[in-house]
Image (cartoon, helix red, strand yellow):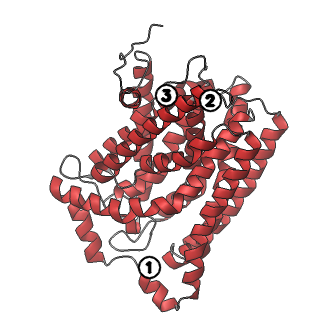
Amino acid sequence: MSDPSPPPGTDRIENLDVLRGFALLGILLVNAAAFAFPPDVSLSMTTPPFAPATLLDWFAAWGVHVLAEGKFVSLFSMLFGISLFLVGGGSPDEAQARKAGSRRLLSRLFWLGLFGIAHGALLWFGDILLFYAVAGLLVLPVRHWRARNLFIAGLALIGLGLLLFAGPAALLKQMDPATAQEVFAAPLAEELQAQVEAMRGSAGAAAAQGLDFWLQWGLVSIPFFTPQTAGLMMVGLGLFKSGFFHGHWQTRSYLVLIGLGAVALVLIAAQALSNAASGYDPVRMMTGGAVPNLALAPLVTLAYAAAIILGLRAGGLGLMRSWLEPVGRLALTNYIGQTLIMTTLFLGWRGFGLYGHVDRAALLGICVAVWVVQVLASRWYRARYEQGPLEWVWRCLTDGRRYPFSRRTG
């Protein structure tokens, strides 16, 4: 999320806001399927009543998996790690300031966690705010470490996250194939249709079904993804302290990262073609089909960031800067805004009832339309106000006082 109130004397780094806006818009590409379909089949291309898929649908799903899945949320996680350091304030040698900063961060994460619970239980099961609040607790005590130590700890946690995924996958490989298929088979068409009808039905039915999705998918995922999320936060903070996000690295270092990211993309794309050929078979995905993307996505993330930072440093990408910086400054508001827009489109009781009735190719068009709305709204808003409405609420709750809601003066 955006850092609403950096400590006194800390200049806001525009690169971070641009990258945060880029990450936030990209995350919608991945989340869109979970807004539009039941979670059991959000990756399936062959499960009735969501099949048969057209060639365009297959291409859209493949492209989102290769170019977006895991990449934008990794960048968002890295940037959140930086905000913990900037907002916490104080240096390692200033015990009093460091203690005060820790108290402030604990309050900040507490309220973020409550936002996440409300968001996940009441609005949309795919909430990430609670993940960040929990993972942030692991980063808080080490935020003043040197970059090298943050890299080591972060990579270790990312490795632990991969092991947590690999453990169940190894057990699954030992199962009888017929048993494994039965365990991971998608729900029957009748059950899926009942879920669709609930989400398109009354407020009570949609709320009950949404809460069930959150309890089954959102909360259960926290232990598995917290280590990797915390590790990405630490790596991001280490990169920040090394000057990466400021644009202080040598050009060749950024180019090396771009090259590594390109190689990673090729490997992910090759595996994704194999996954697609299997119809995204759930057993195959659990026993190896998802591993290349899970392991290599951070390299692609760094390649994206490196390319943008080089462009900004060279004075180019002026249009991208003007579009993305306002979105990044209002990250929390825009994140919840995406949920409100998408649920209005897909729920029945207060929207258009498109749930379960939009194909994946059309979802891309919806994402582009939401991007346009959020970019234009963010630019309009930032021209008039200093803080987003939810950023302001978060800051007031964090510090236990009511700050004035400031208009921009110039």
Q: Which residue is mark 3?
A: 329
Q: Is residue 115 visible?
A: yes
Position of residue 313 measured from the top left corner of the image (x, y, whole percent):
72, 26
Q: Residue 209 sits in which quadrant? A: bottom left
First along the sequence among labels 2 and 1:
2
User: Which class describes the residues within 10 Å of circle 3: few (<14), some (14-19), or many (20+)?
Assistant: many
Residue drawn at the location 31% of the way across and 79% of the way down: 188
Task: Give the CA separation, mark 2 to mark 1.
Answer: 52 Å
Position in image of residue 336 (x %, y %): 37, 40
Numbered badge on residue 317:
none
Secondary structure beneath disc 3? Answer: helix
C-alpha separation, residue under disc 3 versus residue under disc 2: 30 Å
Give the residue at mark 1. 184
Find residue 153 and report its horizontal and vertical position in percent: 69, 52
How far apart marks 3 and 1 lie (CA) works out to 41 Å
Residue at 52% in and 50% down: 135
Q: Earlier in the sequence, mark 3 or mark 2?
A: 2
Q: Nearer the viewer, mark 3 or mark 2?
A: 2
Disc 3 marks a residue whose amino acid type is Arg
The mark lying in front, picked from 2 and 1, is: 2
Residue depicted at x 66% and y 28%: 91
Q: Residues within 10 Å of mark 1 (few under 14, many from 20)?
A: some
Does label 3 or label 1 sit earlier along the sequence?
1
| Mark 2: amino acid | Ala
- Front residue of 48/107: it is 107
Q: Is residue 293 visible?
A: no
Q: For residue 95, which numbered disc appears in the image?
A: 2
Q: Secondary structure at mark 2?
A: helix
